[in-house]
Image (cartoon, grey):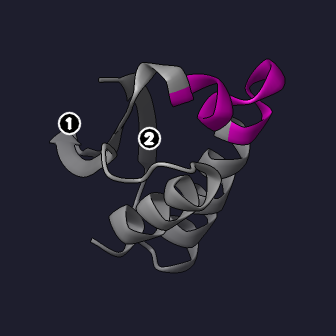
Amino acid sequence: MELVNLTEYLVKELLPNVENISVKEIESEGDKVIQVLVPSDCMSIVIGKGGNIANSIRTLVQAAAYVKKLGRVRINIDSL
């Protein structure tokens, strides 16, 4: 659950409107998958130019998972 809170914090700090954000964890084939749902008009903010922001979020969350020995983590970012 720590990784969900970290991901939610990172996404909420990027967006001006934080009411319509959903972040939840799903178990899939032994991996943890964090599903991030944001409004479609905010997708460009979360993904960034060339996917730089999304890759940075993934790197931070995966590093936290490695330090805490929580296994592999994937992050899926979709629109509502």
Quick check: 23 left or right of 11?
A: left
Q: Quadrant of the N terminus?
A: bottom left
Quick check: 56 left or right of 62?
A: right
Q: Which residues are the magenta region? A: 42-53
Q: Which residue is rendered at x = 45% and y = 40% of the image?
A: 75
Q: Is mark 2 in CB contact (under 8 Å) with mark 1?
A: yes
Quick check: 64 left or right of 39?
A: right
Q: What is the crowding at mark 1: few (fewer than 14 residues within 10 Å), some, or many (at least 20)? A: few
Q: Is residue 4 above or below residue 23?
A: below
Amino acid on which the number 2 mark rests in the picture: Arg
Task: Kindly report the secondary structure that dominates the magenta region of the rendered protein.
Answer: helix
Amino acid on which the number 1 mark rests in the picture: Ser
Q: Among all residues in the image, which is located at the extreme bottom?
A: 68
Residue 30 in the image: x percent, y percent? 23, 44
Q: Please state which of residues 69 and 12 is positioned toward the viewer in this rendering.
A: 12
Residue 41 painted magenta: no
Q: Please state which of residues 16 and 24 is positioned toward the viewer in this rendering.
A: 16
Q: Secondary structure at mark 2?
A: strand
Q: Quadrant of the C terminus?
A: top left
Q: Which residue is rendered at x = 61% and y = 36% of the image?
A: 46
Q: Which residue is rendered at x = 47% and y = 59% of the image?
A: 7
Q: Which mark is residue 63?
A: none
Read off the residue under disc 2. Answer: 74
Q: Which mark is residue 28?
A: 1
Give the spatial CA distance, label 2 vs label 1: 10 Å
Q: What is the crowding at mark 2: few (fewer than 14 residues within 10 Å), some, or many (at least 20)? A: some
Residue 37 in the image: x percent, y percent? 34, 35
